[in-house]
Image (cartoon, rainbow, N blue to C red):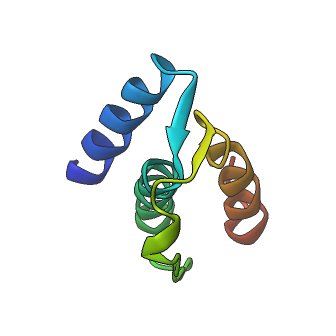
Amino acid sequence: VLSLSRFLRRVMAGTRATTSTLKDEVEIAAAYLDLQRLRSRDALTVTIDVSAALDRTPLPAMVLQPMVAEVAASIVGTP
């Protein structure tokens, strides 16, 4: 439940903005991957390694999540 709550809070915050930071986008992706890991009964293992120097890099809001979702779906076979 906490993973879902964290993911939804991040997504809702991202839908109000047109730009984001790499740190925020990675946090959204990590929350989504936590949910997918739970759904797949731990069949999904992911390590995210991003340099802290890139945390403030500007990106369009919600740019990573669709790509992460597509990759996770292809790995665990869920939409």
* Residue at horizontal 43 percent and vertical 48 percent from the top: 24
Residue 69 position, x and y percent, is 67, 51
> Which residue of the protein is positioned furthest toward the top in this rendering?
16
Horizontal arrangement in the rendering, residue 15 relative to residue 3 (left or right): right
**In the figure, 48 relative to 26: above or below?**
below
* Residue at horizontal 56 percent and vertical 30 percent from the top: 19
* Residue at horizontal 71 percent and vertical 58 percent from the top: 73
Of residues 16 and 68, the one drawn nearer to the viewer in this rendering: 16
Q: Is residue 41 visible?
A: no
Residue 63 position, x and y percent, is 67, 41
Q: Quadrant of residue 5?
A: top left
Horizontal arrangement in the rendering, residue 67 relative to residue 47 (left or right): right
**In the figure, 32 relative to 8: above or below?**
below
Of residues 11 and 56, the one drawn nearer to the viewer in this rendering: 56
Residue 10 position, x and y percent, is 37, 37
* Residue at horizontal 29 percent and vertical 53 percent from the top: 3
**In the figure, 66 relative to 27: above or below?**
above
Q: Is residue 62 visible?
A: yes
**In the figure, 1 relative to 13: above or below?**
below
Of residues 24 and 4, the one drawn nearer to the viewer in this rendering: 24
Of residues 13 and 19, the one drawn nearer to the viewer in this rendering: 19
Residue 60 position, x and y percent, is 65, 34
> Which residue of the protein is positioned furthest toward the left in this rendering?
2
